[in-house]
Image (tube, grey):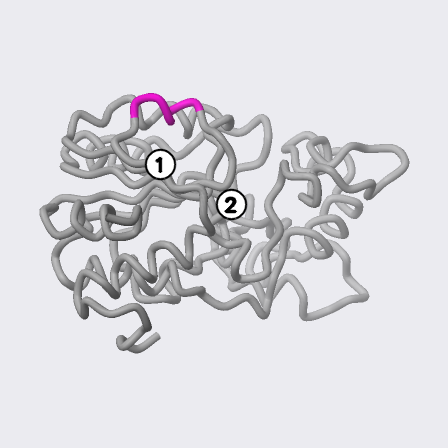
Amino acid sequence: MSKVDELAEILKNSRKAVFFGGAGMSTESGIPDFRSADGIYSQSLNQKFRPEEMASHSFLVNHPEEFFEFYRQRMMFMNAKPNEGHFALATLEEQGILKAVVTQNIDGLHQMAGSKTVYELHGSSLRWPCIKCGKVYPMEYALQDENKPIPHCADCGDVVRPGVVLYEEGLDDEIVENAIKAIGEADTLIVGGTSLVVYPAAGMIRYFRGKNLVIINKTETSADSRANLVIREPIGETLHKAVNRLFHNENEATYEN
């Protein structure tokens, strides 16, 4: 039995599966990850500041123009579309197998693919709240005037910022609680596209008490030794094949993306 067949069999016997994903989930949609050799944090972007500094709360406060320039150039992917893995997860939810997606990504691709229960640990780049009055704008609002590098609220005039968790900022308590609850109640946890090095998010998998822990990642993770199944293949392709085998018992896709 192939590893894809093993995954399909695990999903067949699951009724409370949860997916926990990281940046690798979106690389097949053309969005670079952060820490690989070609990732955003490995690139030389600025002579004065490291990428981690430029994605921090203090950089937003102290260097707002440079922050928004960096964010627009490196953190916004207007044309990105969900890949086969996103659609596969949405199918699993629709069929009553997957109960939640817990993601470290900020791109909103899970929702675009049709997933309903998505806990975005690091926020979303699609929502841009005003830091004073809280009015939320779409991402396009921040791009509409290139002559104004810092977007401002149309109501109160204060700065409008991306609705993501920057370095030096804490995660949203309610989202964390919901994610931990979902993981704690899961019978299967699929961890995909993450090296499990970013905390506190990566520490959430310790709440899993279910039967099957599945790791789908191109490189080794700290949870491999505890996993029932480890797959070192592209996650979107793997999920697509497994879901297709589960529902159609075929090698090629027959469900609609």
In the rendering, which numbered label is found on residue 230? Answer: 1
- Is residue 225 within the magenta segment? yes
Nearer to us in this view, 69 or 32: 32
Residue 252 visible in the current orientation: yes
Image coords of residue 256 (percent x, y): 30, 77
Residue at image position (41%, 59%) is: 237
Residue type, label 2: Ala
Q: 10 Å neighbourhood of mark 1: few (<14), some, or many (≥20)?
A: many
Question: How far is the residue under mark 1 from the one under mark 2?
Answer: 18 Å
Nearer to us in this view, 152 or 72: 72
Residue 241, picture quadrant: bottom left
Q: How many marks?
A: 2
Residue at image position (36%, 66%) is: 113
Residue type, label 1: Val
Residue at image position (82%, 33%) is: 49
Kindly identify which residue carries mark 2: 23
Lower sequence index among marks 1 and 2: 2
